[in-house]
Image: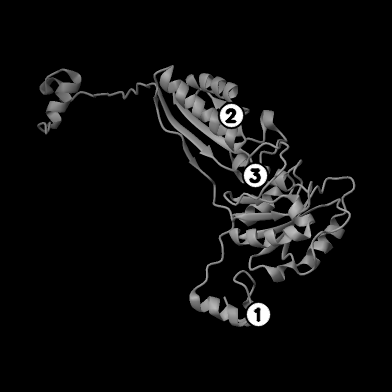
Amino acid sequence: MGKRMTREEFLEAVFSRRYEELKGRELRTVRVRVVGKELSLAQLIGVTDRRVYENLGLHIGTHLGEDHTGQSIGLLHLTPWEATVVAADVAMKSGNVELGFLDRFSGAVILLGSRAEVKSALEHVVEFFRTELGFTVCELTERRQREMKKLFLMGRSEAGKTSLTQILSGEELHYHKTQYTNTGTDIIDSPGEYSETKRCGLGLACFSFEADVLALLMAADEPFSVFEANCQCFTNRPLIGIITKIDSPYANVPMVRNWMVNSGCERIFEVSNLTREGIQELLDYLQEDPVRLTLEQAKARQRLGLTEWEDASRFGLA
């Protein structure tokens, strides 16, 4: 290690004068920061709720009245700050994203869109600044806001299961016919034929063991229910109801709600995949912390015939 400098030696080195000449004089130092070519932040925020983008001011100004619930957010920070213009140009040409915010006086850029599109845009920006402009760049980081309970959707064809899956996953709405049940994602979407065909009903029961929450999904304009009464008797998972297409001119929400109550749904959500009404309430429910019981608490509930998620306060249990 080098020799430790005294105060006198430091002042002589900084001002290039002997210490005797500096004694008694008022000295002034100015700290200057030389900005380098650096991309210091590339962060992908997964599915967002209304509180996130409202706190970022992404619902005012040119975005007045826009609802970005369920979309993802991409954050960039660059120096020199004028590089934000280049980053925004590359991002907009690399994916189907929207420019939420750009500040060339602080070096900040915010992108909006589906998770896949925002991630693609961020990757292109990082690679462009690394290879083409010779910037020192960070790695793209990603962290979802909170882990969601694994949700299993059951319902007839064209009820809106796939559209709801796309919204909850932060994707843009697009047509896709579900051909099989994929249990490898946070949301398990099942073909409508499983609910419409009696022989396939056993398949729904089997797949339900892969999920944390089961959802009976019905459109608000359905003429009848395909679900029997007291469906909760055949599962050991929380059973909720989701009513879609509440914005339909033929919607009869009270009737569909009664069907779901008869089927044993303990909680019912009313949503619109087009206007995204009610999506935030459903997201909040899926992001709630799961119930955790000790072995003794679980045994006590079992003796009373209660599940771990049922309210047991009337029996004096926590």
Towards the viewer: 89 or 50: 89
Kindly indicate the quadrant of the structure image that contains residue 259: bottom right
Pointer 3: what residue? 50
Q: Residue at x 57, y 75 (%)?
A: 318
Q: Residue furthest front?
A: 199
The earlier-in-sequence mark between 2 and 1 is 2
Quadrant the N terminus occupies: top left
Relative to 276, is 305 above or below? below
Mark 3: amino acid: Arg
The earlier-in-sequence mark between 1 and 3 is 3
Mark 1: amino acid: Arg
Label 1: element kind:
helix
One can see residue 270 in this view: no
Which one is closest to the eye, mark 2 or mark 1? 1
Mark 2: amino acid: Phe
Q: Position of residue 280 (x, y in %)?
A: 67, 49
Label 3: element kind:
helix
Pointer 2: what residue? 101
Towards the viewer: 245 or 30: 245
Q: Position of residue 179 (x, y in %)?
A: 69, 45
Pointer 1: what residue? 314
Mark 2 closeness class: few <14, some 14–19, many ≥20 residues within 10 Å: some
One can see residue 41 in this view: yes
Real-space CA distance between mark 2 and mark 1, rounded to the nearest whole angstrom? 51 Å
Q: Position of residue 37 (x, y in %)?
A: 39, 21
Real-space CA distance between mark 2 and mark 3, rounded to the nearest whole angstrom? 17 Å
Label 2: element kind:
strand
